[in-house]
Amino acid sequence: MEIRVAGDARIYVLKNDDGYSRAVAAVGIAEGEVLAPFGARETLATPNYLTVQTGPDTHILLAPEHLQYINHSCDPNVFFDTARMEIIALRAIAPGEEIQFFYPSTEWTMDRAFDCLCGSSECLGRIAGADQLDARALARHRFNLHILDRLAERLAEAA
């Protein structure tokens, strides 16, 4: 059984009996629409499992706090735009659909790598950050500027 534990008019959080929580769309969201603005409850110099990387050495705990329950998918429906500090729909999202983003789109090196269970036909398996992605995964996903800058640096070093 799942119960609603947090949220707002557009996003709510469901928690199940096993303690797993997920963010869900409360309303329909159109492709390209801003789902929510976000900010920092706290800014850290190093990542942890709850932070979102917003710059080369900047990691934030999300505000509002219920946004931390937006889980990973290798086939995401939202993008965390860290330049505009907005969550953008990558495609139409139906009411009741889980909201998910591609963690490496913001994370260069993750605090805790994990085995992905998203079930997508494009699932990468092990998620460890953008620095671990192959060319195919890099071509398939959208990334924030601080990640693109690091990728460019890596290419320049290899040349």
Image (cartoon, rainbow, N blue to C red):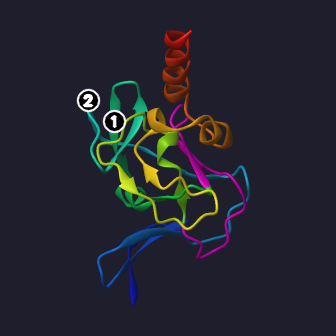
- Residues 151 and 106: in front is 151
Q: Is residue 68 left or right of residue 111?
A: right
At mark 2, the secondary structure is loop
CA separation, marks 1 and 2?
A: 6 Å
Q: Is residue 29 left or right of residue 116?
A: right
Label 2: few (<14), some (14–19) or many (≥20) C-alpha neighbours in 10 Å: few
Residue at the spot of label 1: 59
Q: Please report whichever mark, 1 or 2, sits nearer to the chain's N-terminal start.
A: 2
Residue 93 part of the magenta segment: yes
Label 1: few (<14), some (14–19) or many (≥20) C-alpha neighbours in 10 Å: many
Residue at the spot of label 2: 45
Q: Which residues are magenta?
A: 78-98
- At 46% from the left and 37% from the top, the residue drawn is 132
Question: In the rendered image of this protein, does residue 108 appear above or below residue 57?
Answer: below
Question: In the rendered image of this protein, does residue 89 appear above or below residue 136?
Answer: below
At mark 1, the secondary structure is strand
- Residues 71 and 150: in front is 150
**Quarter in which the C terminus is drawn:** top right
- At 26% from the left and 33% from the top, the residue drawn is 46
Most common SS among magenta residues: loop
* Residue contact between numbered discs 1 and 2, judged by CB atoms under 8 Å: yes
Based on the displayed image, in which of its 4 quarters is residue 41 positioned?
Answer: top left
Based on the displayed image, in which of its 4 quarters is residue 129 positioned?
Answer: top left
Give the x, y percent position of residue 10: 55, 65
Three-letter amino acid code of the residue under disc 1:
His
Residue 4 part of the magenta segment: no
